[in-house]
Amino acid sequence: MEQNKQDVTAQPTAQKTAQRRGRWKMVLVLAVCAAPMLGSYLTYYVIKPGGRTNYGALIDPRAHPIPEMKATTLDGKPSSLDEYKGKWIMLLSGPSNCQQECKDRLYAMRQLRLMQGKEMERVERVWLILDDQPLASGLMSPDEGTHLLRVSKAAVQAWLPVEAGGDASQHMYLIDPLGNLMMRFPKDADPSKVKKDLGKLLKASSIG
């Protein structure tokens, strides 16, 4: 009888020990997966050898993950920025009535990706359209490669940080392969400086 009591007491203890081990294993796996990205952030933003500085404004990625925005494609099918996780995402937003400045930003974003050469396949481009109006005919060619999503203007304004007195549509943003917003480029950004930032990030990161 005494032996049976000991066995019953030992069973919950063994289960708790196994659960603790399982949790530690999960933490270790997550740490290993996150290490490459954390290393690239540390290398690029903290160590900064040679006094290196970044052109774009760094955004705390922990505070700006991709939110639920109920995005749709142009034909009304449900979609999400999450579909492009695993790659670096260059992001623009604005109304469907894309004027010359908007067109210039879309063109610059396309060229910036091409400038990355063999690394260009690690980069996606997305334009968030903030209304439900049709796009102007011929604005985007079928082979352009920019992903178009319709989203709520309010959702974008709540997510994308802007310069004082500015508007999100005036900036290009960069999302890391883990799905976190991490950089905002200035209004009328210098493409050559944006290219350098993006190139350095691609070089420093082993994922995406």
Image: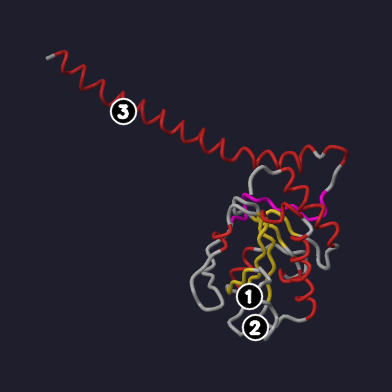
- Residue that numbered label 1 is attached to: 129
Relative side of 108 to 70, left or right: right
The residue mark sitting in front, 3 or 2, is 2
Q: Tell me where the magenta segment starts and ends, as one range.
A: 54-65
Expressed as whole percent of the image width and height from the top left, the position of residue 18 reads 36, 27
The residue mark sitting in front, 3 or 1, is 1
Task: Quadrant for residue 37, please give it.
Answer: top right
Q: Amino acid at mark 3?
A: Gln
Q: Residue at x 68, y 85 (%)?
A: 136
Q: Amino acid at mark 1?
A: Ile
First in sequence: mark 3 or mark 1? 3
Expressed as whole percent of the image width and height from the top left, the position of residue 44 reads 76, 43
Q: CA distance from mark 3 to mark 2?
A: 60 Å
- Residue that numbered label 3 is attached to: 15
The answer to whether mark 3 and mark 2 are in CB contact below 8 A is no
Q: CA distance from mark 3 to mark 1?
A: 52 Å
First in sequence: mark 2 or mark 1? 1
- Secondary structure found at label 2: loop
Badge 1, how many Cα within 10 Å: few under 14, some, many 20+? many
- Secondary structure found at label 3: helix
